[in-house]
Every structure is written in C-alpha cells, then in structure tokens.
Image (cartoon, helix red, strand yellow):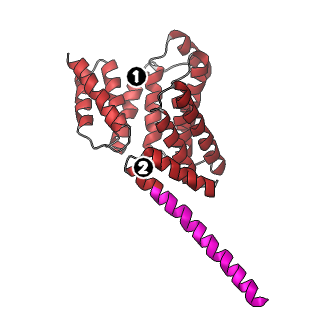
Amino acid sequence: MKKVIVVFFSALIFTGVSFAQSVEELVRQGDMLERQLKEEEAYQKFKEVIKQQPTHLHGLTRCSELASRIGRRQSTKEKQMDFYKAAKIYAERALRVNPKDSDANVAMSFAYARMSLLKNGKEKVEYVREIKNYADRALTYNPQNFKALFVIARWHYEVSNLNGMEKAAVKVFFGGLQKNSLDSAVYYYEKVKALSPEFVLNYLELAKAYHRNNKKAKAIETLNHLLRLPNTAADDPTIKSEAKQLLSTWKA
C-alpha cells in the first residue's frame, strides 16, 4: 500500500510539472508567433494558455491586445465589434488578476479605443472617457509604458477633432477641454517615438497631427522616416500603404 501511495503522488507531481511546462511552451510559441507577425496564430496560442490557466496574466493581456488588433482587420463592423468585445472581456479578466498591471490597463484602453470608432455622439464620448481613464492608470503604474502614452496622444488628437455636440459632452465628463489638444497630441507622440523608435503606427499618427497643425514639412519628413522602418506588427504593411497615399496627396 505504501508503495502504491508513493507512485500515486509521484504521478501527481510529474503531471503538475508537465502542465507547467505545457503552459510555458504555449506562451513561448505565442510570443514567437507574434514577433513573426502571425497575430491570428499567436492569438490562438494565448487562448490555449488561458484555457489551461485562466488567471495567466500575460496570456490574458496578449489575448486582449491581439483581439483589438485582429478586429481592426475584419470585413464588417459586426465582426469588428465581436473582437473588440472579446478584447474587453479578456482585459477585464486580466484586471481582476492584477488591477495595478500597466499592460492590463493598456489592453482595456485599447479595447475601448477600438469600440469608440464604431460609436457616435454621447456613447462615443463615454468610451473616450474610459480610454483616457485606463491609459492614465497604466501610466500611474508604469510611466514609461509607450503604449499608454500612445493612447494618451491619440486621445488628445481625437478630442481636437470632435464636433460641437461631442465637445459639449466631453466638457460634461472632463470639466472642460484643453485649447492645445493638438499640441498635446504631438508632444505625446514624440515621447512615444523616443521610447519606441520602431513603432510604425506612431509615426503615421504623428504625421497626421503635424499636418493638421499646419506643419506640412514635418509631416512629410515623418512619413518618409516611417517608410524606412522594419515591419514589427502585422498591420505595418497596411500602415505603410496609407503613408504612401498620404505622401502622394500632401506633395500634390
């Protein structure tokens, strides 16, 4: 009987070790696939991670951010929203694991940012509020989080582009608007550039901010630099295509 018990517990220990290695290997594969710009495949790997370990923080945050990015490439607004809702759910789960995790807060901010693109009026402004709230929290826990800084930059840019009704609603939520929202957007985009000099999307948005701020030469210079960067995300080829179109328009 004693021998049977020893064998039984040995089997349990071995199973536990194998389980941990399995999750670790899935995470490694997911990270590698993401670096290879295979975001759909990476997304599936991280979903397997949290299926085995539902509170795996890295797996949850990666699922959320990837769902936000993959959703952007869907062919219909309905399919896009399905991914964005999934991104929000994964972010909520990550924040339950650790509400002070900077990346989890950024993931939630991304989810709201994506969903806001499909909203209008007061509902859009409510989403805009959540975008900034979660990005601010992310920066509280990690002031060098370039993704959170990018969200803040984008927030200022979008606020500068709101219509009259939306600006009135923002005043209700935020107690007023900065007159220099566009300048603030440029400031934060430049901070992101310093922290993450190969973040392609940041250059596109920075160029748009410069152009709207009547700094056409800086906008064109920024796009030309963007086109020389390596691709580090699956959307980068599309971003570069948009940059080329903007260059053609702005130089005309």
Give percent across and percent down for residue 191.
37, 38
Q: In this view, does 58 lie to the left or right of 161?
A: right
Image quadrant occupied by the N terminus: bottom right
- In-image side of 198 versus 103 (left or right): left
Q: Do the residues labelled 1 and 2 touch (CB within 8 Å)?
A: no
The crowding category of the residue bearing disc 2, from other C-alpha atoms within 10 Å (few below 14, some 14 to 19, many at least 20), is some
- Could you tell whether 110 is left or right of 193 in the image? right
User: Is 199 rendered above or below residue 219?
Assistant: below
**Residue 101, percent from left and from top:** 57, 49
Q: Work out which quarter of the rendered image holds the C terminus and state it.
A: top left
> Is residue 67 visible in the rendered structure shown here?
yes
Q: Nearer the viewer, residue 70 or 213?
A: 70
For mark 1, does the 10 Å Cα neighbourhood hold few (<14), some (14 to 19), or many (20 or more) residues? many
Taking the image as shown, residue 251 lies to the left or right of residue 81, namely left
The kind of secondary structure element at disc 1 is: helix
Question: Which region is colored magenta?
Answer: 1-29
Q: In this view, does 107 lie above or below 207?
A: below
Q: Residue 12, position in %: x, y? A: 68, 75
Q: Which amino acid does label 2 sit on?
A: Glu
Q: Residue at x 47, y 34 (%)?
A: 151
Asked whether 16 falls inside the magenta stretch, the response is yes
